[in-house]
Amino acid sequence: MSCGDEPETKKGNPYSTADQEPSKGGQLFNNYCIQCHALDRDKVGPALKGVFAHWNYDTARIRAFIINSGESIRSGDPRAVQVAKDWNNALMTPMPHLGNDDVHALLEYMAE
């Protein structure tokens, strides 16, 4: 550095997290969910922020719905049936490739 040169500074919002690597849940959400869902608004499917409360904080039921919504609806799960009714009986794409750790990461991301 020569006399009078100032170090290069990052421009923009210094508190921005846009450059940070997304969490595992964020990556999974971007890979598998964002086409139909947003956290804060309805899209093809419902907004997912606050999803825990809608399912009475029962992660096993939420997981079952994520893995195979049609099976969850056919089983008579009241929330699954209501979601189907609210969304004109459109089924969510089954996600059997997601393991327990993946679903847990997704749910943590949605709870942030």
Image (spheres, rainbow, N blue to C red):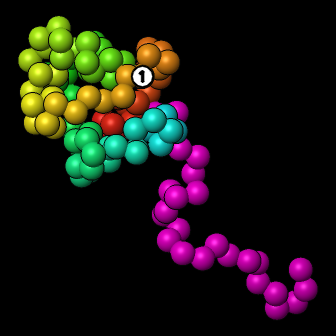
Residue 78, horizontal then vertical, whole percent: 8, 17
Is 10 drawn above or below residue 56 in the view shown? below
Q: Which sits in the foreground, 105 or 70?
A: 70
Residue 41, horizontal then vertical, whole percent: 24, 52
Residue at 36 percent across and 28 percent down: it is 93
Instruction: Work out which quarter of the rendered image holds the N terminus and state it.
Output: bottom right
**For residue 77, side relative to residue 11 (left or right):** left
Residue at 26 percent across and 28 percent down: it is 91
Q: Which sits in the foreground, 10 or 103?
A: 103
Q: Can the viewer see residue 85?
A: yes
Asked which quadrant contains residue 57, the reply is: top left
Looking at this view, name the residue that lies furthest to the front: 89
Callout 1 secondary element: loop
Asked if the magenta segment contains residue 61, the reply would be no
Q: Residues within 10 Å of mark 1 (few under 14, many from 20)?
A: some
**For residue 52, side relative to residue 92 (left or right):** left
Residue 50, horizontal then vertical, whole percent: 21, 37
Looking at this view, name the residue that lies furthest to the right: 2
Residue 95, horizontal then vertical, whole percent: 42, 22
Looking at this view, name the residue that lies furthest to the bottom: 4
Instruction: Work out which quarter of the rendered image holds the C terminus and state it.
Output: top left
Look at mark 1 in the image and give the residue it sits on. 95
Q: Which sits in the foreground, 57 or 45?
A: 45
Q: Which amino acid type is shown beneath numbered disc 1?
A: Met
Q: Main secondary structure of the magenta part?
A: loop
Which stretch appears magenta?
A: 1-25
Asked if the magenta segment contains residue 20, the reply would be yes
Asked which quadrant contains residue 100, the reply is: top left
